Image (cartoon, rainbow, N blue to C red):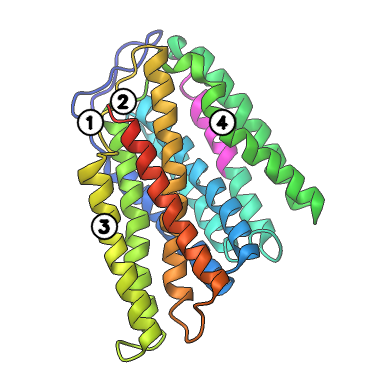
Amino acid sequence: MTPSIQPGHLPVHAHGRKATWFELFFDLAFVVAVAQLSGAYAHHYDLSGAAVFTVAFLAMWWCWLGHTFHATRFDQEFPRQRLVGFGQIAAVSLMGYGASAPLDDRAWAFGGGMAVFKLLLVLAHLNERRWRGAAGLIRVYAVLYAAQAVLWGAGIGLSGAGRLVCWGLALALDLASPWMVARHTAAVPPHPEHLPERFGLFTIILLGEGLASVVHALDHGGLDHGSSALAAGVGLVLSCVLWQAYFDRVKGHGERHVSDATAGRRLRLWAYAHVPLYMGIASMAAGNVALAAPGALQLGSGALYVGGLMLAVGGLVLLGREKT
């Protein structure tokens, strides 16, 4: 990647930019963390498990999103940027350890990883303050991530409702963050090719978890066991169908050019549409494993699995409406 123009302006988008080798390595940390979370959900495949899974998954994904939006605007593969990135990988590893019990026994690890990651996002943005054209965007993100770091850190020392309130507020800030920086989006747009590619790669990560769950389902009883074979077969077919729907039908990874407020609004809606898609794919991966056990398919567990499928389909529908 070629260093950008002089300080005081904005980084120039390199034509045809692709994900870097570091970004692919960075994604592996999330592969592990999501696998840990999915495994915990598969062993507690009920409404309570679904609630914990939802909170933890959204919190982790928004960390990935924060890193991705920073990188697509500012990353030039400088040593200081890589140093911050390695720190973020360490934070995700800590989150992954805590993901098996993020609200109780390992809350210190999950919350601590989140707090450190958010602090590193503050540092990453402050390191780019030489780009005066992005000063407003950098300021909003720095304040936002600092507030979240405090909330995640404070939640570690609390228990019960207090922890849920702190972490709920931190997650609410994540959900609102695209609108908090909306007025800066057109002035400091993300890379039109690189950003959608990164979303496509995260889709691949989750679909890969779906394929891994096929193997785990077979481990429960092998091909000669009815429930295992059925769960594995359904998981395999749906993973392939969802891949084709995302990449071939709705083309969710298509270029996203942002030149005005309307395009910025469409970018936000496109990004939000990935939330139900990702939640659905990840939930179904856990369901493939959970439903492979003999007698596991009951009304409640079946409803959870269908609910995950409906979330994924809903996300695809929204992406189809937000085609460029």
Mark 1–mark 3 CB contact (< 8 Å) = no
Q: Say which mark, if any, is on residue 122.
A: 4
If you read the primary sequence from the N terminus, does the residue marked by circle 1 or circle 3 appear first?
1
Distance from Cα at disc 1 to Cα at disc 3:
28 Å
Mark 3–mark 2 CB contact (< 8 Å) = no
Q: Mark 3 = which residue?
A: 241
What residue lies at 35% left-to-right and 44% top-to-bottom?
A: 316
Question: Would you call the spot at circle 3 few (<14 residues within 10 Å), some (14-19), or many (20 or more)?
Answer: few
If you read the primary sequence from the N terminus, does the residue marked by circle 1 or circle 2 appear first?
1
What residue lies at 33% left-to-right and 10% top-to-bottom?
A: 6
**Which image quarter holds the C terminus?**
top left
- In the image, is residue 79 above or below residue 164? above
Element type where label 3 sits in the image: helix
**Foreground: disc 3 or disc 4:** 3
Distance from Cα at disc 2 to Cα at disc 4:
21 Å
Residue type highlighted by circle 1: Arg
- Region of the chain picked out in magenta, as a range: 117-130
If you read the primary sequence from the N terminus, does the residue marked by circle 1 or circle 4 appear first?
1
Distance from Cα at disc 3 to Cα at disc 2:
28 Å
**Which image quarter holds the N terminus?**
top left
Q: Say which mark, if any, is on residue 191.
A: 2
- Say left or right for 1 vs 26: left
